[in-house]
Image (cartoon, grey):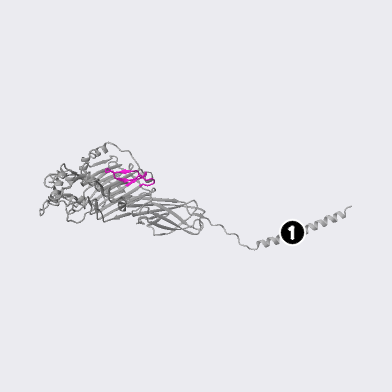
Amino acid sequence: MSRKYQRLGRRFGALITLTALALMLAPPVHAAVPFKDAAFSGYATGTYLHADALSLVAGPNTLKVDAGFGAAAVNSRGLTAVTDELGREVSPALAGKNSYGAGFGLDANLLNSELLEQQQAAAAAPPSTDLIVKRLGPITVPGVASAGALEGRAQARYDANTCILGEDMSYGQGDVADLTLLGDEIADLPTEIVEALIGTNPSNQDPGAVRTSSRTRLVPQTNEAGQKIGDNVGLMSETKQTLAPVVLFQGIPGAELTINLLGEWTLRAVATGIPGQAYIQYMPPEGQTPVLTVQNTLPAEEGQTPLPAVGVTLDQLLGIAPLDDLLSGDVLNLGLVELELNPDPTIVENPDGTSASASVDVVRVTLLPGAEGVLEGLLGDLLGDDAEDPDVALSLADVRIGHMEVAATVPPDGIKCPDIEVTKTASPDPVNAGNDFIYTINIVNPYDCTLTDVKVVDTITATRGVKFNIRSQDPAASSVSNNVITWNDVGPIPPRGSKQLRITVNIPADSAAGNLINTAVVNSNCGLDTAQGGGKINLGLSGGVRVEIPRVQAQVAPPLPRTGGENLLFVASAVGLTLLSLLSAAGYRRLRVRAENAP
């Protein structure tokens, strides 16, 4: 296990004794549960920016907002209601549905719901759906929010009879660009002074783009390093975030603070069903040092050079190395906010390998005591002596940047996917002795992966007295030995594709009646991405069929030719009757003479 994952384990207090437990406890022997019978579930969700209550000046309402949201869920027993730690719905309870995805760019309590629906996407399966995309923007609601673009994406796939391999079962994505919250004509404050309480791009820089994507997927059984450890599949739930800078007090000189999170962040849960092999992976972007920077990007006085950015390394983020004076001193010298980095993450990894879950925030923002007065003074100085002091009512309640949650659960030993479909026909059926017929083997790939190394072994036998000769194969077989035909590789078979093999067989004229018996066995590999990506693992998939076809009809002996025997028999019969008649007449005359001469 890598150093950063070890640290997560110590911090969460869950990984320290797993190895010892696995060694002490002999796990029971399980067989992977067939997909149709397997109880598995999982979800992944992420929110780029969450705030329970935002306000800058006095007003009747505070702004509650979630931006850049993506969620995905799956449950083989039917979707149940799932909410995350923020109270956001991850999936609803839907009868007859097993997978769900949702995404949006922005949701806020002070914005028109009908407007927001134009960029909120959701999908549920079965039946499986296409990718749903909804877009909106640019939008501006004065004093509340503005955005250059908002987008939601969602897709769901599920088939109660077979695994979804090679594609996500559920997917949700939310994108937002150039976001500002509580800016633009806030209580008559000029926009050249206050651009926004929170925005996604520092002053005078390019707009910031945000993306959160969440998914659930069946994956090959691998360890954390991506090495194969089993022959079945487990479940992965994953959220990835590309996080634009978050700018607090945007446009206010002396207060503007930029938090820059570099690269792509990932939180992943994998449950394999193998003891000791349920794990969480939390990864800031590889190769990024620092992974996070904090800087006062707008000096208090015109012409003053901004203070240099302070970088946070991965070890500092995970608590392995000290933060030095990042949370005090020059960077946050205004006494407005406190930043908590990676605060209170939670993780659960079941020692039996059947479940894993985690929740993290990259950054939490908390107002420091006295922040409202400091900001009020800054704004008063900017407005000048003749202006009325602004009625500041500052609120930054439960502000979280980079919130992610994941969970995955599978049965012991994982999930066994159904065999590939193999069927066989014979034509004609029945077949007469002395004729040919053709076997057709049809191999169907029901999955979204490509089948490779597709080996087919076909064995032909027959009931007693039935004779046959194998004439040819299409495509040509790798070998033919007596009654066994072997194709070493008839692949690749593309996703949702099929392959046909044909065998021509002759039935000799002297064959007895009966049946041929044919058994076809297919073995193949489905190349699946590992949970970690960057490599593929071959999942073995097989299938077979046994048929007793065709029925063989023996030849029938032809009737004797007509040679005139019937006429001869008639003549012989006629002669016989004539002789009999003559003999009878002569006898009658003799008897009569004897009677007349009697005394």
| Residue lying at the far left of the rendered structure | 304
The quadrant where residue 339 appears: top left
Is residue 438 toward the left or the right of residue 452 in the image?
A: right
Is 13 on the left or on the right of 330, as rendered?
Answer: right
Asked if residue 88 is among those painted magenta in the image, a careful observer would answer yes
- Closest to the observer: 244 or 453? 244
Q: Position of residue 588 (x, y in %)?
A: 81, 56
Q: Nearer the viewer, residue 85 or 412?
A: 85
Q: Secondary structure at mark 1?
A: helix
Instruction: Check disc 1: other Cα within 10 Å, few if <14, some if 14-19, many if 20+.
Output: few
Q: Main secondary structure of the magenta part?
A: loop
**Residue for point 66% across, 61% down:** 566
> In front here: 444 or 387?
387
Residue 325 position within the rendered picture, expressed as x and y whole percent measured from the top left: 12, 44
Residue in the picture at 49% in, 51% down: 464
Quarter of the picture containing the N terminus is top left
Q: Is residue 82 magenta?
A: yes
For badge 1, the amino acid type reads: Leu
Residue 229 is at least partly visible in this image: no
Task: Answer above or below: position of 167 versus 578.
Answer: above
Residue 322 % position (x, y): 14, 43
Give the magenta part as a residue range.
73-98
**Where does residue 308 sit, x and y in percent of width and height?**
12, 51
Residue beneath disc 1? 577
